[in-house]
Image: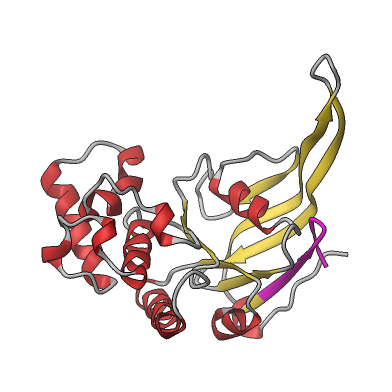
């Protein structure tokens, strides 16, 4: 039976996304004609609700399906069965309503682009804007995460790990998403920087009424941030 640990305050918020019996399977192997011999079930009957303004923690051991769930929310994989239902008026097609902050900021930022262009990457899929508009959006969001405006023309390799993660957070914020997926957002950072990034995420959530899905195996991080926690095991929420 699927369940999640629920805090009373989180349970009061309106629901914005609901997953109903979602299953994702991949071919385990193919025969000589390319037909699947069998399937591996990455997600196996997920029922989950996401509420506005909350941090929903997703915890579980490696291989339990957390990464597949993140890809599903981003629109990178489609459910084999079941449904994702947006209840806030959005269709949830593609990844326009969901952005992600990856575990490793160094590998997630394009080294060829200046910071302002990295920050505004999600906007290019949402319609045309002028160069001046893009710069203005980048400057505004960068300031919110503690990146100074004179740094907008620099490149990712010129920043520390913590600063690069701030840039990644700014990129996630730039399209004003309904949900931000935080995929192990501090595990690749120095201990001294981890608390700064977590506190920044909490401050941004309060200021902008953000909704987070926090994917982590670090119980301390989840305890620090999450309003509710769902535990995954073998593709299910238990």
Is residue 236 covered in magenta?
Answer: yes
Q: Is residue 208 above or below residue 118?
A: below
Task: Write the start and end of the magenta stretch as one range.
Answer: 229-238
Image quadrant where residue 128 sits: top left
Q: Give me the residue at 67% from left, 59% from top.
A: 66
The front one of 134 and 48 is 134
Front residue of 175 and 156: 156
Q: Please give left or right for residue 29 compared with residue 141 in the image.
A: right
Q: Position of residue 25 (x, y in %)?
A: 78, 40
- Provide residue 236's location: percent of width, then percent of height: 81, 59
Picture coordinates of residue 166, whole percent (x, y)? 34, 68
Side (left or right) of 66 relative to 171: right
Is 201 left, or right, of 7 in this rendering?
A: left
| Horizontal and vertical percent position of residue 202 | 43, 80
Residue at (49%, 45%) from the top-left corner?
Answer: 95
Question: Is residue 74 depicted above or below 178 in this figure?
Answer: above
Q: Residue at x 77, y 55 (%)?
A: 46
Q: Nearer the viewer, residue 83 or 165?
A: 165
- Quadrant, the N terminus: bottom right
């Amino acid at each position: 039976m699927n369940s999640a640990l629920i805090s009373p305050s989180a349970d009061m918020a309106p629901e914005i996304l609901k997953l109903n019996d979602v299953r994702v399977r991949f071919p385990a192997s193919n025969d000589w004609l390319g037909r699947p011999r069998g399937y591996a079930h990455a997600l196996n009957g997920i029922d989950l609700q996401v509420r506005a303004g909350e941090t929903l923690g997703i915890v579980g051991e490696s291989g339990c399906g957390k990464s597949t769930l993140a890809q599903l929310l981003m629109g990178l994989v489609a459910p084999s069965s079941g449904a994702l239902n947006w209840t806030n008026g959005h269709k949830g097609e593609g990844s326009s309503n969901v952005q992600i902050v990856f575990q490793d900021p160094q590998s997630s930022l394009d080294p060829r682009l200046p910071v302002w262009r990295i920050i505004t990457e999600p906007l290019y899929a949402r319609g045309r804007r002028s160069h001046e508009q893009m710069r203005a959006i980048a400057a505004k969001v960068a300031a919110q995460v503690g990146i100074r405006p004179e740094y907008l023309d620099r490149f990712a390799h010129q920043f520390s790990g913590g600063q690069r993660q701030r840039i990644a957070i700014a990129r996630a914020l730039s399209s004003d998403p309904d949900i931000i997926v935080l995929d192990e957002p501090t595990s690749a950072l120095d201990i001294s920087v981890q608390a700064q990034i977590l506190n920044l995420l909490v401050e941004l959530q309060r200021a902008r009424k953000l909704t987070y899905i926090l994917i982590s195996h670090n119980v301390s991080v989840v305890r620090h941030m999450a309003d509710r926690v769902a535990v995954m095991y073998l593709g299910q929420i238990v």
